[in-house]
Image: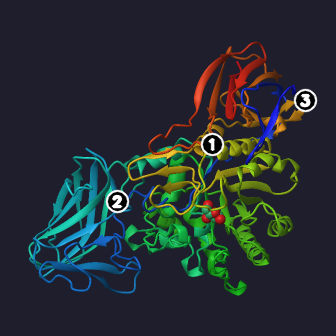
Amino acid sequence: MKDRLRKLIIPGLGLLLASGVFAQTKMEVQVNKPVSDIQPTMWGIFFEDINFAADGGIYAEMVKNRSFEFDTPLMGWIQPNSDRHSLNEKSGMATVIKEGDEPNNHFARIQVSNADGYVLINEGFRGMGVKKDNGYRLSIMARRQNSGIERINFQLLNENDKVIAETSISPTSSDWKEYKADFKATDTEAKAKLKITFEGTGEVEMDMISLFPKDTWMGRENGMRKDLVQLLADLDPGFLRFPGGCIVEGRTLNKRYQWKKTVGDVADREMIVNRWNTEFAHRLTPDYFQSFGLGFFEYFQLSEDLGSEPLPILSCGMACQFNTGELVPMDELDPYIQDALDLIEFANGSTDSEWGKIRADMGHPEPFNLKYIGIGNEQWGPDYFDRLKVFIEEIKAKYPEVIIVSGTGPFPDGEHFDYAEKELKKLNAEIVDEHYYRPPKWFMENADRYDSYDRDSYKIFAGEYAAQSVAIASPDNKNNWLCALSEAAYCTGLERNADIVHLTSYAPLFAHVDGWQWTPDLIWFDNLSSYGTPNYYVQKLFATNSGTKLIPILSDKKPLKGQDGIYASSVLNEETNEIIIKVVNATAGENEVNISLSGAGKLSPEGKIIVLKSDDMDQVNSIEDPMAISPEEQSFDVKGKKLDVSLPAHSLSVIKVKRQ
Ligand code: AHR
């Protein structure tokens, strides 16, 4: 590298170049010296129901507390003409009734004494996103008891209480019966609400009051928000990890994620409180529950839609150690292990197996072809390894082909991490999940993390990572360009070690702008729109420009891992016959690079360079300016086996050349 550069230190990033100064770097890509295969799972997605990711987010249900199962049974429901102490006899009232011992056994009994006066409103998840001319599908379970209530009217109101859609149903049956109605919106509104009124007086009981846009992902009923899934599809993810995250573990064992309670009829899925609802005093969301309308069947289906390997993570019998750390005694672990075995049967079993039949009955007789299963999320200490050992023995005895993903705990170094490494090696762990929520500087400085890892041991799943602009879980963290650029530098290190790094995912994935608990997050949304952060575009550039073979890229015969602020990795995509080079210029000066491609064969005369950049390290994308930082593509001339390209200051560039 030609070193005629003035340097300066910028807080938070370390070594940078003075603005305006530019450098030249020579690089060599050894196309004919492939180092290893790259796994198709290399760039994936981590999904957790945090920040309204599922309920209030990708799960397109618009009614909050649709089945009156919240701990405060009428949370989300407003009766403007009644107050809870002196219920207005002149109009009516809703009472939540519990019947039977089955899950989801609450419903609302509505007594109407004055049809003109009684109103019931659902506020949605920080409102309801309604789009002009879009169709909406209402469904409700109702039971009419000796009632003069002839009709139930449903209206969507905008913020000024103007009606923007309306429909009605006539409850006829004295037994529980489902009623459906479709309607269309005349206006767009981000914070609409659902108003319910009654014609006639008397008593009617209602449950599962549900409202979905018709235009869900793939038009499915009980479906997902199309724009949000599209953002995932655009990442071309190699795998989908679900359902988390700490949500797997629960604050207590009783509130852990139990996949069996999330399959079958949606109305029968047992709702529980979301563990993120009051986790952070600075971001309380007491109305955050898990309806499990998005359950394990839907996660598998989503994986299939995205062409991703499903990667479920299950409780290992330990509640979150940041909360109660409750432990299942070793001699009571069987039901937890059985859950794992049954999950494999649910995903892969024949349709005449117990759990395979449930999958088939839900509309998917073909297996989901599950290859991986994760045991435990962020556990640490001997209790985890004692339990993991039994899981490994039992799963491998029945399903030797299923790959088990284990974890190293919440931190990428320190006492617990070192202990985990040793124990995992003793257990011959196959793939190990590492988490790092660290400052941008850490990402820049650790781009060589895996260079020194043992090549004869387990493979790596970089399962949760994100640069934190302030501190872990600080509400002031921003998805700014400094964080994204540092992750890009780090990703070149992940890719350069693709022989042992087999899966990677940024975390968390989603956040509702009015309903989040944790920041930074990859994708932000409100009730109408969504956008990818600069971090999203970093992930997208790596994931959609992945390769099948890792090939060396060197400068002065050394891998580029931060020397003079330059980080690089290169791959060959044998399917498209492209050489793909990713370079991060973390300096404040332009860098003119000269890349020679040795052993490349004949090249197409035109190459492509896709650049993601900003001059402002604090810059972010937003609902108002969703593409402020987004990739721009240009062509350049290829001269023989040499590429001359200019890398802008503070940029990630993806350089692509086709072999002829
Ligand atoms: O991604 C947010 C949380 O961070 C995850 O739930 C947990 O695994 C980690 O601590």
Q: How many neighbours does mark 3 have within 10 angstroms: few (below 14), some (14-19), or many (20 or more)?
A: few
Which residue, as the protein is rendered here, is positioned at the far right?
557
**Amino acid tagged 3:** Asp
**Amino acid tagged 1:** Trp
Write down the residue under mark 3.
Answer: 556
Residue 312 in view of the camera: no
Write down the residue under mark 2.
Answer: 127
Q: CA distance from mark 1 to mark 3?
A: 29 Å
Q: How many neighbours does mark 1 have within 10 angstroms: few (below 14), some (14-19), or many (20 or more)?
A: many
Q: How many neighbours does mark 2 have within 10 angstroms: few (below 14), some (14-19), or many (20 or more)?
A: many
What x and y, as percent, mark residue 590?
A: 72, 27
What x and y, as percent, mark residue 502?
A: 73, 49
- Element type at marker 1? helix
Mark 1 vs mark 3: in front:
1
Relative side of 515 to 96, left or right: right
Q: Quadrant of the C terminus?
A: top right
Question: In the image, what residue occupies the spot 81% across and 27% down?
Answer: 31
Q: Quadrant of ligand 1?
A: bottom right
Question: In the image, what residue occupies the spot 40% across and 82% down?
Answer: 102
**Amino acid tagged 2:** Gly
Cβ–Cβ under 8 Å for marks 2 and 3: no
Write down the residue under mark 1.
Answer: 481
Most foreground residue, 62 or 430 = 62
Of pointers 1 and 3, the one earlier in the residue sequence = 1
